Amino acid sequence: MQISHLTPINSKRLPTRDLYPNNYGPNNNYPNDYYLNEDTSSSAGSSRYLPRAVPTGLIINHCTTPGIVALTFDDGPYIYTTQLLDKLASFSPPIHATFFVNGANWVSAIDDESTPYPGILRRMLSEGHQIASHTWSHLDLTTASTAQRVEQVTKLEDVLLRVVGIKPRYIRPPYATCENGCLEDLEGMGYHVVNFDLDTKDYENDSESGIQVSVNKFNSELGSNPATDSAIVLSHDVHQWTVERLVDEMVGTVRARGFRTGTVGECLGDPESGWYA
């Protein structure tokens, strides 16, 4: 597939093209429609550009690979995140999760080296977790302007690039809402927009007794057939009882039912090279 053969997309609004002209491929194709084929082996074929496995311009709620449960944690890092990383690493084999991080939500700034948070982010990456965007300050992107959306996304990008050396391709919009041009704006910035299909409601049940409600919800809503079922699970590393109890219960159920855990990228069939720009 040569550059000249890529079909331009003329039917979509490109509100961020002027702000991010280098994000667009040949003929103004969206940035994640194709990627450069870096495999030079004879078995790789002659295509210079290859289609990406994960689409942009829509909200993804489900895994495409059966048998995988993608545990995701929003709103951190926070004071419980180190404990969570310890716990995920203690399982055999270790659990790889996806962290949809904010820059300034429950903490003031994740790039302050006088705090644990830059080290926590680096540990996430080094231990095989996927780091994804949840915007800078958890602003509702549906009600935000294009300029505000760009600021929320790129401010976090800049900090993550400086602290961890990566820029995410994946984003979860705060409050799981992305309307009024939000999808077009995020597509223009090259993002896969991912929500979930299993909400633990841990944010409503953060107490020693209350977390059982989330445990029961997870157990009742997770499928039972790894040959056909999968899940993208919403939880939060900013809540004590998610970390202290819910995670253990979820992993126990996942493994008892024959599922394996993985990152959002893995459950969507995207190699690690596709998780970051």
Image (spheres, rainbow, N blue to C red):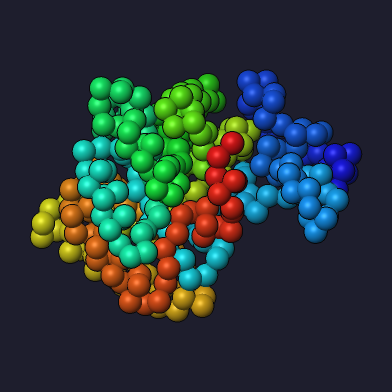
Quadrant placement of the C terminus? top right
| Coordinates of residue 56 in the picture (x, y in percent) | 62, 45
Q: In this view, does 276 lie above or below 20?
A: below
Identity of the residue drawn at 23% across and 53% down: 242
Spot occupied by residue 18 in the image (x, y as percentages of width and height): 67, 20
Task: Work out whether residue 133 or residue 94 is closer to the camera in this orientation and state it.
Answer: 94
In the displayed orientation, state which residue is furthest to the front. Answer: 41
Residue 96 in the image: x percent, y percent?
Answer: 40, 55
Q: In this view, does 182 lie above or below 111?
A: below
Q: Tell me, yes or no, if residue 203 can be seen here.
A: no
The residue at 10%/57% (across/down) is 208
Q: Indicate the quadrant where residue 205 lies.
A: bottom left
Which residue is painted at 12% across and 53% down in the image?
A: 207
At 58% from the left and 58% from the top, the residue drawn is: 269
Taking depth in this image into account, of 273 and 241 the one nearest to the observer is 273
Q: 141 or 42: which is nearer to us?
A: 42
Decide if residue 107 is on the left or right side of residue 188.
left
Total numbered labels placed on residues in the image = 0
Q: Looking at the rendering, which quadrant does residue 138 occupy?
A: top left
Observer-nearest residue: 251 or 171? 251
Q: Is residue 202 left or right of residue 12?
A: left
Residue farthest left in this picture: 209
In this rendering, the answer to whether 157 lies above or below 262 is: above
- Where 161 sits versus 175, above or below? above
The image position of residue 81, as x and y in percent, is: 26, 43
